[in-house]
Image: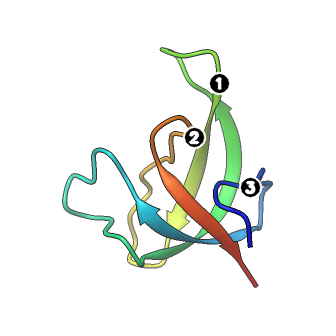
Amino acid sequence: MKINPKLKGGDRIILYYMKDEYGSVKPGEKGTVVKLIDDPFEDEKMIDVKWDNGSNLNLIPSTDIWKKID
């Protein structure tokens, strides 16, 4: 499996690292990608994730680390 693969809506992921966790999403948390959205501060897409724990924190591809799971 590849770290930080390209994602699309419906993909399942597991988080390995999030720069600014804010306490609600920890390494090992699983979630489902909802959609890709424009990052208002960078020239990249953020990844809108519905985490299994109920959080909706976005992934930032330039700082966060995840893997796609089956």
- Please name the amino acid that badge 2 sits on: Pro
Residue ID for mark 1 = 44
- In space, the residues marked 3 and 1 are separated at their CA atoms by 14 Å
- Is 17 placed left or right of 67 in the picture? left
Residue 20 appears at what percent x and percent y? 28, 45
Label 2 Cα neighbours within 10 Å, binned few <14 / some 14-19 / many ≥20:
some
Query: Camera-side residue: 69 or 32?
Result: 69
Residue 70 appears at what percent x and percent y? 76, 85
Residue drawn at point x = 70 percent, y = 41 percent = 36
Residue 65 to residue 40: above or below? below
* Quadrant position of residue 67: bottom right
Kindly indicate whether the residue at mark 3 contacts the one at mark 2 (C-beta within 8 angstroms): no
The numbered dot on residue 27 is none
Kindly indicate whether the residue at mark 1 contacts the one at mark 3 (C-beta within 8 angstroms): no
- In space, the residues marked 2 and 3 are separated at their CA atoms by 9 Å
Residue 15 to residue 43: above or below? below
Label 1 Cα neighbours within 10 Å, binned few <14 / some 14-19 / many ≥20:
some
Secondary structure under tag 3 reads loop
Residue drawn at point x = 42 percent, y = 52 percent = 57
- Is 34 placed left or right of 20 in the picture? right
Residue ID for mark 2 = 61
Q: Residue furthest left?
A: 23
The numbered dot on residue 5 is 3
